[in-house]
Amino acid sequence: MTNDVLRLAAELMAIDSTSGQEGEMMARVCLMLESRGWRVKRIPVTPGRMNIFATCVREPLVTLSTHLDTVPPYIPPRIVDDTLWGRGACDAKGIAAAMILAAEQLRERDCPVALLFVVGEELSHDGAHAANEQPGTSRVLIDGEPTGLKLGLGTKGAMRAVIRTTGVAAHSAYPALGDSAITKLVALLHELPSLALPHDALLGATTINVGQIAGGVADNVIAPSAEARIMVRLVSDAEEVWGLLEKWATGRATLERGSLVPAMRLSALPGFETTIVAFATDVPELTRWGTPYLYGPGSIHVAHTSEERITRAELLSAVGGYVKLAEAALAIDRR
């Protein structure tokens, strides 16, 4: 049983847990936590996938939580000097390792702490949805994401959507006989950066990412259909943005709305630096777990990239930071 936070993170990263394929990861973590003296509850999410809720007392009051799924592609861990590289180093298996060691320190101090590890954060937040259906006693939720060891005062939301265009197939040698859905889609997407979208004084600008494009049937066929998958980073009410998108697409494309995570404003605590983050989290889906705080080591700028990494110093600071944050937040809640 290792208490080296860097090597514990590497052990977690050695198991591929790309979103939707977290089964082996969660089963192994259950056994690992049980061997470290935690009482583990398995929370079913979908067949073969589950969340983990680990407790040390009957009625925990503060919960350290993060996700154990990762984005593709899987990149195995490697330690070079005191830096851990690979998928999940900072988003969020390094965070999970720091939380485990912090929780064990809190347990030794008789703090009523629990650990909640969920699946599906990178896609649909279905793990957080399942966790929120559980009755609990937690009064404080500390969600772990790479915030550079600063408390997040706010997070942008996220709304997924699919844009679809239709055309008329024809032999590509005779373009006048067809109508290209791809040409229509490209023209639409070219307009996205110039759309007038909401801006918030705290959270900043609404942004849109075109994540995937598909369409057509062959090089020598005018494309009869095309689609693009987008993610909107929200700073305001989702309905306001959806209305603007519908107006933009009317008569030219159809829109299919996907998963939604609202923007959030969070609390500060004395003694902690603060920041604003542009990414979405599980926090809006965990409404039954207490007052939320967002904090973690690592940089979001290397998460989801081939350069994802975290240092031993960052992880050690996070262990102490989670202990300090849990005790401070619990003290405020008890007033």
Image: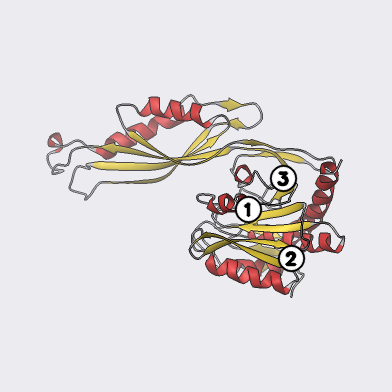
Q: Position of residue 64 (x, y in %)?
A: 72, 54
Q: Are marks 2 and 1 in contact (CB under 8 Å)?
A: no
Q: Nearer the viewer, mark 2 or mark 1?
A: 1
Label 3 vs label 1: CA separation?
13 Å
Whichever of labels 2 and 1 marks the residue nearer the N terminus, that label is 2
Going by the numbered disc 2, the residue's amino acid type is: Val
Q: Secondary structure under badge 3?
A: loop
Label 3 vs label 2: CA separation?
27 Å
Q: Nearer the viewer, mark 3 or mark 1?
A: 1
* 62 to 253, vertically: above or below: below
Q: Which residue is mark 1?
A: 134
Q: Nearer the viewer, mark 3 or mark 2?
A: 3
Whichever of labels 3 and 1 marks the residue nearer the N terminus, that label is 1
Q: Secondary structure under badge 2?
A: helix
State the mark number for residue 290.
3
Q: Position of residue 222 (x, y in %)?
A: 19, 42
Q: Is residue 29 left or right of residue 185?
A: right
Q: Which residue is mark 2?
A: 5
Q: Position of residue 255 (x, y in %)?
A: 37, 35
Q: Residue at x 56, y 62 (%)?
A: 50
Whichever of labels 3 and 2 marks the residue nearer the N terminus, that label is 2
Q: Residue at x 84, y 42 (%)?
A: 332
Q: Is residue 47 visible?
A: yes
In the picture, which quadrant includes the N terminus?
bottom right
